[in-house]
Amino acid sequence: MRIFNRIVLILLLAGLAALGVCAVVYAFDIGTYRLADLPRTLRLNDFYEGLRGFVGNVENRNVNAFNVIVLGAIALLGLILLIFELTPPTPRRVRMQQQGTYVTRSAVENEVVTAAEQNPEVLQSKVKVKAQRRPGAKIDIRASIRPGEDARSIQSEVRDQVQQHLARIGIPVSSLKVQVFESDPRETKTRVK
């Protein structure tokens, strides 16, 4: 949402800069144009007349269904953009239990990978950590195992190992999701033990 706001602000500031340049040109009488000729030069008279007629129709309650739908869509889009702008962004760091203490998501990812790959059946793991506004992190683990292994028991072991490891070093976990996939050992990275 911030990118959209920056684009709108850049366009607005570019328009103001262009308007300022035009005002300087007209103020010092540099060109052959007159300020009164500007709406006709930019062909804004037709736009103004159309807008004035539309506003007059709205004031007189003389609008058709298409105009009502367009106005409703514009109002709904404005409301949605306002809600997106007012919701705070997702935090970049994981909040700890102590007030004012944070740890980076990459540090949490490294600790989770270390804990998950302590299990000898896990060939490799991929971890995604999402910080929250409250203490703790949402953690998604995708662990690769050899074909034919007992996936449920390995999934449970990995979950327990990660929870115990993070509790031991003091990183709170609000949500832990472990997915186990069978994969060819030749297609996974090799671990240094």
Image (spheres, grey):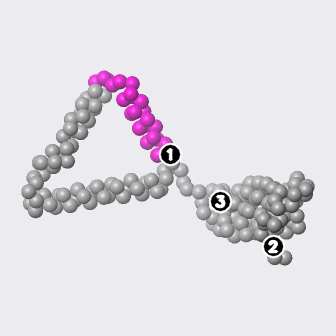
Return the residue at label 1: 83
* Residue 35 image offset from top left, x and y in percent: 12, 51
Q: Quadrant of residue 167?
A: bottom right
- Name of the residue lying farthest toward the bottom: 193
The residue at which mark 2 appears reads as 191
Q: Is residue 78 magenta?
A: yes
State the residue in front, 181 or 89.
Answer: 181
Evaluate whether residue 69 shows in this view: yes
Side of 191 where 105 appears, left or right = left
- Of label 3 and label 1, which has the lower sequence position? 1
Q: Main secondary structure of the magenta part?
A: helix
Question: Could you tell me if residue 163 is visible in this image?
Answer: no
Q: Position of residue 177 (x, y in %)?
A: 77, 54
- Residue 73 position in % (x across, y down): 43, 35
Q: What type is the residue that disc 3 sits on? A: Ala
Query: Along the polypeptide, which appears first: circle 1 or circle 2?
Result: 1
For image coordinates 40% across by 33% down, the residue present is 70
Callout 1 secondary element = helix
Residue type at the position of mark 1: Ile
C-alpha span from label 1 to label 2? 46 Å
Kindly state the secondary structure of the residue where label 2 is placed.
Answer: loop
Q: Residue drawn at (65%, 57%), measured in percent from left and top? A: 132
Magenta segment boundaries in residue numbering:
60-82
The quarter of the picture where residue 160 lies is bottom right
Q: Amino acid at mark 2?
A: Arg
Residue 51 placement, left or right of 160:
left
Percent of width and height locating residue 180: 81, 56
> What is the number of the mark on residue 131?
3
